[in-house]
Image: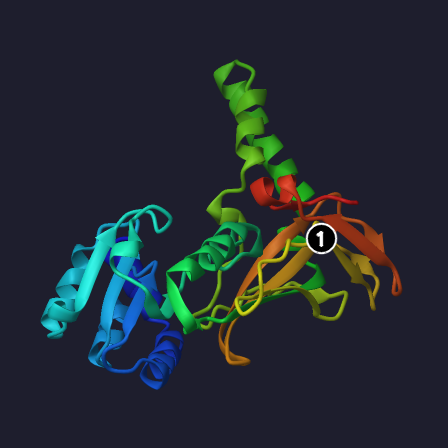
Amino acid sequence: MNAHQHYALLRRKPRALALRRIIQEVVKPGQMVLDAGCGSGLLSVWAAQAGAIVVGVDFADLALARALATENGVADRTTFLQGDLNAIGLEEHGPFDVLLAMVYLKDPRRDHGASAMVHDLGRHLRPGAVRVPDQVRYTAQALDCRSQHFASRMADLDRGVKELEVAFGMRMDSFRSAMGHRPPKEAFPVRDDAGVVLLPDARALSEVRPWHTVDYSLPATPWPDHLALTMNAPGSFTTVLWQQELMFRDALIFRNGSVGWVHPAPEVAAGDTVRSRTGTEWHIDNLLLPV
């Protein structure tokens, strides 16, 4: 991310301040802290201000993080390494007493790799080390949401491509297929500053149901290969509303929302149970296909 993207993220002040409170609570002078996915370096600075020796790692350029540490007087207690957390050579710097791992992508279909990496980082931690977050919970809810109806969006895309075919006098099926295979950013609803997905036309068809919990105090467990939701209202089941909850010591740090598209979208009645695959198509296309 560039400075503008970091700034937009930090404008969600309650989230950052919740993490600062945790850092001030758990980080002790002289401890070693690993800030995985350190980004702008804000958490690293707070941990160093608490008296820790901090190593921050990120794929992105870390000039901003180093500058932030310098201007806040903690450059001598922070080391920033650019690269892959799985291959950066953390053995030279650990073991660590605290792991700050804000590596999640607000979307369960993209978090499998992140959770596996955080489990693996356990080899660089001292026994009894603190992890923040220590759990990540995912819930799901069925919605009738016409603005997120996948087939309608594809029909609009078909019409647009056909217009181009007429204008250019050529076939463009491959162009349409390429665009439909991976959803553009514009296809997803926006979130407010609290991470709440804004779906003003949505109607709930089910209760919010637990789907998966990543618990870093336990060995890694497989992610579910399907989602089952029982309806308590009739409608067109177009959309799954996912909630990702980052937890520390059973308290919520903050919550993120995202959506998945049910395809084809079934007409449901109260009492119906719909099962969808959370497999390859979902990971790539965000499509929840029937089991």
Choose top left, top right, bottom left or bottom right for residue 201: bottom right
> Which residue is more in the foreground, 117 or 141?
117
Choose top left, top right, bottom left or bottom right for residue 181: top right
Whether residue 63 is visible, yes or no, is yes
- In the figure, 192 relative to 26: above or below? above
Is 230 on the left-hand or right-hand side of 245? Answer: right
Whether residue 40 is visible, yes or no, is no
At which x and y percent is residue 155?
A: 65, 37
Q: Please report the residue visible at 83 percent of the width from the left and 68 percent of the height from the top.
A: 232
Q: Residue flagged by tag 1: what amino acid is it?
A: Thr
Is 121 on the left-hand or right-hand side of 252? Answer: left
At which x and y percent is residue 38?
A: 30, 61
Q: Please report the residue visible at 47 percent of the width from the left and 47 percent of the height from the top.
A: 185
> Which residue is more in the foreground, 261 or 86?
86
Residue denoted by label 1? 238
- In the figure, 104 relative to 150: above or below? below
Is 22 on the left-hand or right-hand side of 154? Answer: left
- In the figure, 261 relative to 96: above or below? above
> Which residue is more in the foreground, 34 or 151?
34
Q: Please report the residue visible at 37 percent of the width from the left and 68 percent of the height from the top.
A: 100
Q: Please report the residue visible at 25 percent of the width from the left and 60 percent of the height from the top.
A: 93
At which x and y percent is residue 34?
A: 31, 65
At which x and y percent is residue 29?
A: 24, 82
How many residues crowd around disc 1 within 10 Å: few (fewer than 14), some, or many (20 or more)? many
> Which residue is more in the foreground, 125 or 166?
125
Choose top left, top right, bottom left or bottom right for residue 44: bottom left
